[in-house]
Image (tube, rainbow, N blue to C red):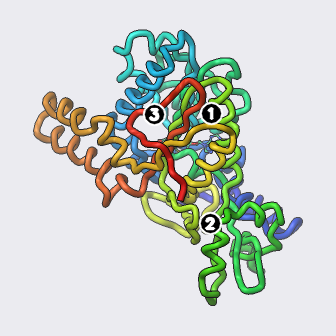
Amino acid sequence: MSEPNGLLPVLADRIRREGPISVADYMALALGHPQFGYYMSREPFGRSGDFITAPEISQMFGELIGLWAAQVWLDLSSPGQFALVELGPGRGTLMADMLRSTARVHGFGAAAQIHLVEMSPALRARQKAALPDATPHWHDGIDTLPGNLPLLIIANEFFDALPIHQLLHGPAGWRERAVDLTPDGTLCWGSQPAPQALVASVSPARSAALAASHPAAAPAIVELCPAGAAISHELAGRLVRQSGAALFIDYGYADAAAVGDSFQALAAHRFADPLAEPGHADLTAHVDFAALAEAATSAGAVAYGIGTQGGFLQALGLETRATQLMARADEAGRRAIAEAATRLADVQQMGHLFKVLGLAGSGLKALPALTLYRPG
Ligand code: SAH
């Protein structure tokens, strides 16, 4: 990390003028500042980057999700046109693998209009190159997605990149955790008054858990992701109106009462100080899946899951697909396929930490490989 940090002076200037900024504003700028944001100019994935995601580990991930999507399309009575939407497609690998594995599902590819929600110009270029036979439509956000077609929506490691607020709950009440500046001009943690609307949005389950816990020396941290909840709510409403389904996969938790700090930075495959190098490290927070499910059901969609990635991939036939691929591979290839399957599904690796939430709108009575969501 020897490159000079272009974002630091921008943040310092703003904090000097306006005071501390919320964790949410910090995260949004560190990831999405048009010039210095982490995702805006670089390609952070893969061995030489900062982290590896499931589609980059193995083609099996995208292939199985493609078959999931094809089954949902069949369950919708094979609409002649639909929007196949991906939120935050990264390098385009997942979509490319989905399109390949569904190529033999008669009619699916011809009916699919590809829509990609991606804020980064650098990654849009990468996605274009990964999908030479498709003609994707790109969107800055979900608002411009088609309003008149059935939707099949996929998001892998998208929600963890959306800005979170951190509320501090202590004996004196609520504060919001903020990013401040030390006298020598480096970033440090601070706090500011908590906006009433945020405090009011803390779930009843979480409030009850806080009320029951002993007051600790350090305040408890409660994370809220209004941006994620708003997207889940808006998409769910569209699924009801337009028909279709969504699949959200990410690391996170299903416990609606969970409390604690999951804000983290990753650089060169290692955890880093989230304040050390804004714009040079990936910033994420664990996804509150119960909040996404609640936001979706309040818009009338039916939620499925919240399952584990391991269980979901097994149910979709991970072992069968691995065996098929191994039959065509040499010794080293067979080992790599087995390792990838373990990495994706084993409970010690991504299998348990990563969760799956499905949303169904009109036109569907069930979702493949997922059971009905039961809160609590
Ligand atoms: N799904 C990919 C990439 C995950 S990284 C994979 O699994 O490999 C997160 C992706 O979401 C990147 O493509 C990033 O540019 C995009 N992204 C993050 N925040 C976004 C936002 N607010 N709007 C649109 N895209 C966003």
**Which residue is identified by label 3?**
367
Residue 292 visible to the viewer = yes
Residue that appears at 64% across and 60% down = 278
Q: Which residue lies furthest to the right in this view?
A: 17
Residue 2 placement (x, y as % from top left) = 55, 61
**Which residue is identified by label 2?**
205
Question: What SS does tag 2 mark?
Answer: helix
Neighbourhood count class around disc 1 (C-alpha, 10 Å): few under 14, some 14–19, many 20 upward: many
**CB-based contact (under 8 Å), mark 2 and mark 3:** no
Residue 176 placement (x, y as % from top left) = 75, 71
Residue 211 placement, left or right of 350: right
Tell me the number on the disc at residue 117: 1
Q: Which residue lies furthest to the bottom in this view?
A: 217
Residue 175 placement, left or right of 115: right
Neighbourhood count class around disc 2 (C-alpha, 10 Å): few under 14, some 14–19, many 20 upward: some
Mark 1 beta carbon near ligand 1 (under 8 Å): yes
Tell me the number on the disc at residue 326: none
Mark 2 beta carbon near ligand 1 (under 8 Å): no
Looking at the image, is mark 1 or mark 3 nearer the viewer? Answer: 3
Name the amino acid, label 1. Answer: Val
